[in-house]
Image (cartoon, rainbow, N blue to C red):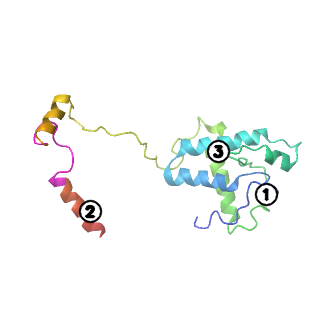
Amino acid sequence: MEKGMLNLPSFYNEETNGTALGHILWCHNVVKAYGMYEFAKARYENLQDTRASWSKKKTFEDNAKAMNFGNPGLSFDPDQDLTAALSKHYNPELVKEKLAECHDTLKKENADKVDEKADAELAYDLTTWEDFPGVTITMSKVMLQVVTRGWAGVTGTGPNVGFTQYAASLREHYA
């Protein structure tokens, strides 16, 4: 959606009734593009908590003032008519579809029912790799490597001829 966020009203506009349209679409994109399901789910749950504290007895302004400053806005409400709020958007039906999809995927009630992938690839998990796979590092091996300037001790680390050739082939391919 190249123009997907253009002409979306803020959650502080009364026509949205506090619904964080841009934020929900961003959560949708984070899941679809990067597979960051848990991250998006945590942000969406904040919006759901705010919706739970929203009082129909209070005015819009009073409710808006009570919103969470760190993650303001409300989650999607399937019963809310967003036609007026999305009237200036180039594709309001697509926005409504994505809002509903995001709500169905990330809402608290579906925590145990939804596949964690949520139709996205899993994100890189940032766990560290084993520094020297298959090699047991000991202080004596490290000292031997230092004293012999890399000729003995812990070997097979760092760039070698095969790695250098592979890097050169990648540079040539993408040049």
> Is residue 175 left or right of 2 when viewed as pictured?
left
Q: Mark 1 points at which residue?
A: 13
| Residue at x 33%, y 40% (from the top left corner) | 129
What label sits on residue 170 in the rendered view? 2
Q: Which of marks 2 and 3 is nearer the N terminus?
A: 3
Seen in the picture, residue 49 relative to 25 is either above or below; the reply is above
> Is residue 144 left or right of 7 when viewed as pictured?
left
Quadrant position of residue 132: top left
Q: Mark 3 points at which residue?
A: 44
| Residue at x 65%, y 53% (from the top left corner) | 23
Secondary element at tag 1: loop
- Callout 2 amino acid: Leu
Distance CA(mark 1)–CA(mark 3): 19 Å
Q: Quadrant of the C terminus?
A: bottom left
> Is residue 92 left or right of 129 when viewed as pictured?
right
Q: How many numbered callouts?
A: 3
What's the magenta region? 150-162
Q: Which of marks 1 and 2 is nearer the N terminus?
A: 1
Distance CA(mark 1)–CA(mark 2): 51 Å
User: Does residue 43 belong to the magenta stretch?
Assistant: no
Q: Which of 140 and 125 is in front in this view?
A: 140
Distance CA(mark 2)–CA(mark 3): 41 Å
